[in-house]
Amino acid sequence: MFAAKEIDVAEWKGDLLAVGVTEKDLAKDENSKFQNSVLKKLDSHLGGLLAEVSSEEDFTGKSGQSTVVRLPGLGSKRVGLFGLGQSASSTEAFQGLGKAAAAAAKAVQAGDIAI
């Protein structure tokens, strides 16, 4: 059993920061900024990189989608967006997130991962 604790995603330092997002979480305002407060804060910390990558790679948060970006010079070596689909309320969505994050962590040989 592990204890979950809230972390400041913009300040976390490790190998991979995996962020589960729904399709709704990726909604943007008229300035192309995320409306979701967590994504907005993280994207601001990363200079707009997540908004840019989500647009360029047509990442919409659909279940099974993922995108991982390398962050040289920042605390996290990589940050990944992992799609949960339309809702994050199902067990299957979180199981899919766990499997996708584990596969990404293995692929980049991450020792420290936060979800």
Image (tube, helix red, strand yellow):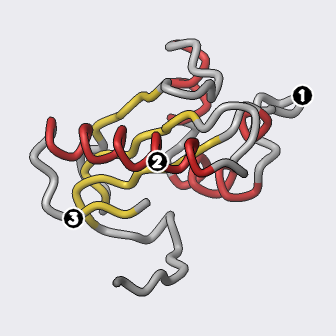
Q: Which mark lies nearer to you, 1 or 2? A: 2
Question: As drawn, is 111 to the left or to the right of 115?
Answer: left
- Cα separation between marks 3 and 2: 19 Å
Which residue appears at 69% of the width and 38% of the height?
Answer: 22
Quick one: 95 or 21, which is closer to the camera? Answer: 95
- Cα separation between marks 1 and 3: 36 Å
- Tell which circle, 1 or 3, labels the residue nearer the N-terminal end: 1
- Cα separation between marks 1 and 2: 33 Å
Q: Residue 31's x, y, as percent?
A: 83, 30
Q: Which mark is residue 52?
A: none
**In the picture, residue 75 is in which quadrant?**
bottom left
Quick one: 45 or 107, which is closer to the camera? Answer: 107
- Tell which circle, 3 or 2, labels the residue nearer the N-terminal end: 2
Vertical side of 18 occupied by 1: above or below: below
Please, what is the three-letter code of the amino acid marked with disc 3? Asp
Which residue appears at 61% of the width and 31% of the height?
Answer: 51
Question: As drawn, is 79 to the left or to the right of 38?
Answer: left
**Residue receiving disc 3:** 112
Which residue appears at 42% of the width and 86% of the height?
Answer: 3
Query: Are there few (<14), some (14-19), or many (20+) residues within 10 Å of tag 1?
Result: few
Please, what is the three-letter code of the amino acid marked with disc 2? Gln
Q: Which mark is residue 30?
A: 1
| Badge 1 vs badge 3, beta-carbon distance below 8 Å | no
Quadrant of image for the C terminus: bottom left
Q: Which mark lies nearer to you, 3 or 2? A: 2
Please, what is the three-letter code of the amino acid marked with disc 1? Glu
Q: Residue 72's x, y, as percent?
A: 24, 45
**Residue receiving disc 2:** 95
The residue positioned farthest toward the right in the image shown: 30
Counting every numbered tag in the picture gives 3
Q: Residue 113's x, y, as percent?
A: 29, 61
